[in-house]
C-alpha cells in the first residue's frame, strides 16, 4: 500500500477485555515497530520486528502485552485484561534498511 | 537509554515569523528524525538527518552529531505549521527511536 495502515482507528473497551490492534506496514519494509503515546507525551518504544522475528520487546510494559508478525508483514499487538492505564494512542511504524521510519495513523484506545 | 531534551516546550508566533527549535541528546546516535504531529494526530516525517544540513521548502534542519544536538528552522511560518514538533534520535543499529517531549508550536494569523 501507499503507507502504513492501522486498524481499528478508535477502540473503546471495558476494563478486563482483550484487544487486538493491527498494523499493515509499507510493502517490502522488513522492520516494524510499535510505540505507545500518552496524551501530551512523545511516543515510547514498545517492540521491534525484523521480518517475523521479534528482536526487541524491552518496551512492553508487562506480560499482558504481546505482539506478533507471523509472516513478516502484518503485525498484531494484543493487550489482555485491559486496564484504564492502557488508554493511549498506539502507533506502528515501518522502514527499509537504513531509511526513514514511517508511522501509521495510530489506534486510539480508550479503556473504560 | 538516550535522554532527549527539546526546547522551547511551547512557542507562539505570528504568521510570517521565523523560529528555531532545538533538540539535545545524551549519547552518540546512528540517526535522527524530526516529525510534525498535526492537530489531527498524524505524525509526519520532516527530516531524516544523521548529520549535516538539509532543506525542504521553508523548513531546514541541522544535526551536529559530535556535539549531540539538532536544530529545526521554520521560516515564514504559516498557521498550518501549528502542532507538535518531535525529534527522535536513533541509538541502536535497528532503528529504535527515542522521542523528546516535543515543542508545541502555535502560529496565529
Image: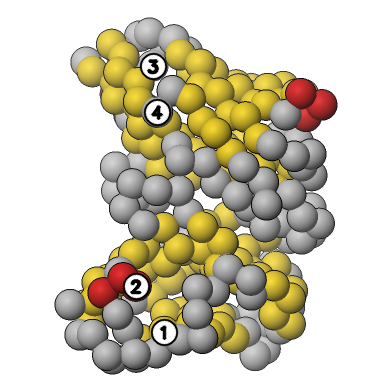
Measure how far apart labels 2 and 1 are at the Cα level.
8 Å
Residue A76 in view here: no
| Contact flag, marks 4 and 2 (Cβ < 8 Å) | no
* Secondary structure type for disc 1: strand
Q: Which residue is mark 4?
A: B9
| Contact flag, marks 2 and 1 (Cβ < 8 Å) | yes
Subunit of label 2 = A
Measure how far apart labels 4 and 1 are at the Cα level.
32 Å
Subunit of label 3 = B
| Residue A79 tag number | 1
* Secondary structure type for disc 4: loop
Q: Is residue B14 above or below residue A102?
A: above
- Is B71 placed left or right of B93 in the picture? left
* Secondary structure type for disc 3: loop
Q: Which residue is mark 3?
A: B77
Residue at mark 2 shares a chain with residue at mark 3: no
How many residues crowd mark 3 within 10 Å: few (<14), some (14–19), many (20+)?
many
Task: Write the residue at 58% across / 68% down.
Answer: A59
Measure how far apart labels 4 and 2 are at the Cα level.
26 Å
**Colouring of the image:** secondary structure
Circle count = 4
In the rendered image, residue B94, in percent from the top left (x then y), is placed at 76, 60
Task: Write the residue at 23% across / 85% down.
Answer: A15
Q: Which residue is mark 2?
A: A86
How many residues crowd mark 1 within 10 Å: few (<14), some (14–19), many (20+)?
many
How many residues crowd mark 4 within 10 Å: few (<14), some (14–19), many (20+)?
some
| Contact flag, marks 3 and 1 (Cβ < 8 Å) | no
Task: Write the residue at 79% across / 39% down.
Answer: B28
For residue B103, which quarter of the picture? top left
Amino acid at each position: 500500500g501507499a503507507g502504513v495502515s492501522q486498524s481499528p482507528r478508535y477502540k473503546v473497551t471495558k476494563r478486563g477485555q482483550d484487544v487486538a490492534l493491527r498494523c499493515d506496514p509499507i510493502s517490502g519494509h522488513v522492520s516494524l515497530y510499535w510505540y505507545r503515546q500518552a496524551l501530551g507525551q512523545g511516543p515510547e518504544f514498545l517492540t521491534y520486528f525484523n521480518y517475523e522475528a521479534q528482536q526487541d520487546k524491552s518496551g512492553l510494559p508487562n506480560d499482558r502485552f504481546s505482539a506478533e508478525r507471523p509472516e513478516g508483514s502484518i503485525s498484531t499487538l494484543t493487550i489482555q485484561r485491559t486496564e484504564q492505564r492502557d488508554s493511549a494512542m498506539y502507533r506502528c511504524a515501518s522502514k527499509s534498511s537504513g531509511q526513514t521510519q514511517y508511522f501509521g495513523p495510530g489506534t486510539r484506545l480508550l479503556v473504560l | 537509554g538516550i535522554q532527549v531534551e527539546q526546547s522551547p516546550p511551547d512557542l507562539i508566533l505570528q504568521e510570517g515569523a521565523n523560529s528555531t527549535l532545538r533538540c539535545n541528546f545524551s549519547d552518540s546516535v546512528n540517526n535522527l528524525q524530526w516529525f510534525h504531529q498535526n492537530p489531527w494526530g498524524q505524525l509526519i516525517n520532516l527530516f531524516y538527518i544523521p548529520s549535516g544540513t538539509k532543506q525542504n521548502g521553508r523548513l531546514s534542519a541541522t544535526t551536529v552529531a559530535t556535539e549531540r544536538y539538532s536544530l529545526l528552522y521554520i521560516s515564514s511560518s504559516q498557521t498550518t505549521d501549528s502542532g507538535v514538533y518531535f525529534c527522535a534520535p536513533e541509538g541502536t543499529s535497528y532503528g529504535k527511536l527515542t522521542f523528546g517531549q516535543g515543542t508545541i508550536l502555535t502560529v496565529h494569523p
